[in-house]
Image: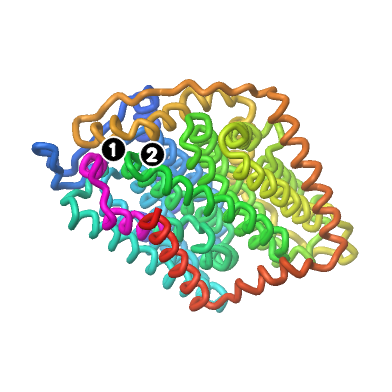
Amino acid sequence: MLAPLAARLSKHLAFVSCIATTGGGLAILVILAPTVFSGRELTHFLGHWAPFSGQELGDTFGADPFGLAFALAVAAIGLLLLIFSLSSLLDLGRRELGAYACLSQLLIAALIGSGLTADLVNLFVWFEVAALASYGLTGFFLERPLALEAAFKILVLTNLASFAVFIGAAIIYSDHGALNFGQIEQALHGHTRDADLVALGILLAGFATKAGVIPFHGWLADAHTAAPGPVSALFSGLMVNLGVVAIVRLSLQIFDSHTADPVLGLLTVLGAISAVVGAVLALAQDDLKRVLAYDTISQMGVLLVGFATHEAAGISGATYHLLNHAIFKSLLFLCAGAIVHATGLDKLSEMGGLARRMPLIAAGFVVGAASIAGVPPLNGYVSLGLIHETLFSHDRAAYVAIVVAQIVTVAALARATYLAFFRRRTQRLPDLTPLHPGMITALVGLGAGCVGFGIFPYEVLRHIVEPAAGGLLASNAYAAGVLSAGAHLPIPAVNYAYFSARDFLTALGTLAAGLALAAWYVRVPEPRPITWLRALHTGSVNDYASYLTAGGIVTVAVLVIR
């Protein structure tokens, strides 16, 4: 609310207003963190409408370790993205800058709220707030037809998703008279019916659309490509995680008691398909931001597979990777946005030789790509290692799929890095606009996050990730906490060996195989199966809506027929 008003007086005042308010929100979460990550769940009933005889009539907020970890990541990374974007967009008019700052903060607020709410309809409200902000940010530069087209697609597909979420919540409420997560969990305990499974399937389809999971992913690449670089970072690094957080809540904390096997099996299949197909599509793109967008689809698949293991180590690895993805994907999109802003180039075939002209951007992109590739000592090595170890012990088929996806991911990012930064360029680049101090601050901060989360894994595990995994595995304790003044959640001990021979060899093997695949792919014509796969992505909102609808029907059918 302050940003548009402050911008009418001064663009710099709007900048200060955004940083102060977002930083204030981050500070509040940081103050809560020691209590919550010690295993205590904090609960607040809006208007002090506390439950009576186990029935909750008002909205409930519950800060458990998993939700607070997500909220902290959104607030911290969102602050850096605001610093970057407002520094790079100071040439906008006052009205436009105020609107951009307002929409960006609205999206950040919605994501924080989605991580902390413990009410199904309130989660729908935050979903809608995030959607509203995303429409405006996607089509922010109205003079670009591509931006308006992408905004229309995200409007149509996200509205279908939000309608599904609302209908799913309505079915549960009509069946059990409950919207509080804990009250729903207790109502479903031993009483899950077909109507509940239909509601779950509809809810999963709606939130899978926000996460960009295949086949619900049609909007993602177009929206990420059309939006400004910092907005793409907000979408890919933070907003899509709302869908994953909601899916994890539903699958592990609300419906866990009697539907675990079909739900987790469904998530494993959807995750494996998204991981492999998303990586293949990323390898086939010429637009730099589309490479990163399709890689986001792949990473969402990896997260679903990790959470679906329902093991402390696998869930810890997936939680770790959720935080890592927010860091390294935001870094990569900021680098891509800086390239487009400075050169006007967006296609890899037109780039080359940027490492010499843009060394900081090149270094940031290499760090982000190496983090996703799982190169030690960067952060992706730890989270992927935990996921791989759990899958190797419990689901070899999923393990093979995730390793294949990792190889193709390495190839896609290595190809993009080479073509953009290290390929010899014959034509002279135009004079480049120097980076503003705020832009440098954000890039350095995110790069430091990739390094810090990689070289201090045990601190992250012990103080953030393990408490989050404990809350997800202890659904009964979580449910009791959000129906009372809070609860103490168990904290599992996850055994992780940083210098595990298997993890190191897997990282080395996927890196070597991915680099070899990238070297081969830049020299050959596009394979026909990839051409067919690309042909399914027509850009038509009708086709994407059809994929979403078909995916929703299959999801419901799998759960009901189980």
Range covered by the magenta-colored residues: 182-205
Above or below, comparing residue 35 to residue 292 in the picture: above
Residue shown at the point (47%, 74%) measured from the top left: 546
Q: Residue at x 52, y 76 (%)?
A: 543
- In the picture as drawn, the residue positioned furthest to the left comes out as 52
| Secondary-structure class at tag 1 | strand
- Residue 404's disc number: none
Query: Does the magenta segment cover residue 201?
Result: yes
Q: Residues within 10 Å of mark 2 (few under 14, many from 20)?
A: many
Residue drawn at the location 19% of the way across and 40% of the way down: 45
Whole-percent x, y for residue 297 in the image: 57, 55
Q: Position of residue 205 (x, y in %)?
A: 41, 60
The residue lying toward the viewer, choosing from 352 and 173, is 173
Circle 2 sits in a helix, a strand or a loop, which is it?
helix
Residue 425 is at least partly visible in this image: yes
Q: Amino acid at mark 1?
A: Gly
The answer to the question of whether label 1 and label 2 lie on touching residues, with beta carbons closer than 8 A, is: yes
For residue 62, the mark is 1
Between 40 and 428, the residue placed more toward the observer is 40
* Residue indicated by mark 2: 67
Image quadrant occupied by the N terminus: bottom left
Asked if 240 appears above or below 150 in the picture, the reply is above
Residue type (three-letter) at the residue carrying disc 2 = Gly
* Residue at mark 1 to residue at mark 2: CA–CA distance: 8 Å
